[in-house]
Amino acid sequence: MNDPTLLALGATVLTGTLAVAGVQTYASGRAQRQALEDRLTADLGAGAGASRGRRFAGVDRRLRRTRLGRAIHLRLSATGLDLTAGEFFVYVVSVVVALWLIAAATLAPFFGPIAGVVAVWSAVVFLNWQRQKRIEAFIAQLPDVARILANATAAGLALRTSLAMAAEELEAPAGEELSHVAHQLTMGRSVDDTLGELAERLPSRELIVLVTTLVLANKAGGSVVNSLRNLTQTLEDRKETRREVRTMLSEVNATAFTVPLLGLGSLLLINSSNEGALARVTGSPVGQLLILISLGLYAVGFFVIRRLGKIEV
């Protein structure tokens, strides 16, 4: 062998060695990153079931790398549901396919895509409803939060310690959210940033008032006991007011959901009394246009009734 041959052989061996080392380093770093993501997911409130085996783990890992997966994860973290982004995505896709097939077989093939769109919209509405439900439950616990913080502050405890004590004594969702706040404060984050993040995650006027009171007291110092005790009574009064308003608007909300259900019932009645009627109607562009207009009017009626029955307290 001459010198160029030895040089090429040595370069090949060196390149192969570096390639193997690079692959091992990449695999190790990826495993460490996945372990860190799993720990962070558990800390951010995956719930009591975080330690159990998850379904569709591969789908979840791939989905979390996309913008859609990150958006789903953020929405799920605000609802408190014990679901991963992959599980929720697979469930929604399954429901979309099922409703598509059922609508196409029961009504007409034209209604299959419409049923799929309605299923996706229903999934988004479900997440928003769960988030609002969690916010309402948190608001209902705010008087107890303010009372515990006032008593702990009156006993001479620091704000960080008071928040940790409130997290231990309260049930979910306030206990979980305050536990997350206490954990963030332990990790070195400031009180302003941590409480501001809480207010963004569960937006409400009551929580904003409480957060503003705590932040100002933390910055300016001095006694915050009287402010918290006055705030406790105010939150109790608002709690009763919200309950009365929700009771008065229950009929309006029921009407908003009854209107589109009447439209769906009418379609089923027409198709059952005259089999194949919807297939013949949707067989022409004019019929499809009229069906879309009628569905749009039902949707407009739903949103108008919901808007008229929405009162900010």
Image (cartoon, rainbow, N blue to C red):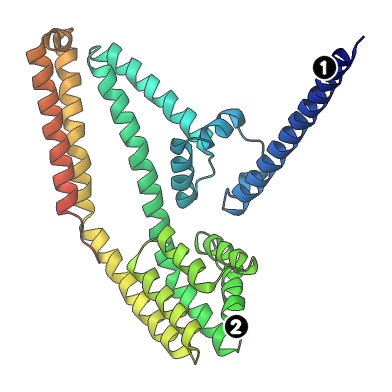
Give the crowd class for mark 1: few <14, some 14-19, many >=20 residues within 10 Å: few
| Quadrant occupied by the N terminus | top right
| Residue at mark 1 | 8
Seen in the image, is 219 located left or right of residue 273? right
Q: Earlier in the sequence, mark 2 or mark 1?
A: 1
Image location (x, y in percent) of residue 77: 49, 49
Q: Is residue 276 above or below residue 74?
A: above
The type of residue carrying mark 2 is: Ala
Label 2 vs label 1: CA separation? 69 Å
Seen in the image, is 149 located left or right of residue 138? right
Image location (x, y in percent) of residue 177: 52, 61
For the point 86% across and 12% down, the residue is: 5
Please name whichever residue, 307 or 239, is drawn nearer the observer in this view of the structure: 307
For the point 20% across and 51% down, the residue is: 251
Say the numbered circle drawn on residue 104. Answer: none
For the point 39% across and 81% down, the residue is: 231
For the point 54% across and 84% down, the residue is: 151
Q: Is residue 118 above or below residue 193?
A: above
Say the numbered circle drawn on residue 158. Answer: 2
The type of residue carrying mark 1 is: Ala
Please name whichever residue, 271 or 311, is drawn nearer the observer in this view of the structure: 311
Tell me, yes or no, if residue 148 can be seen here: yes
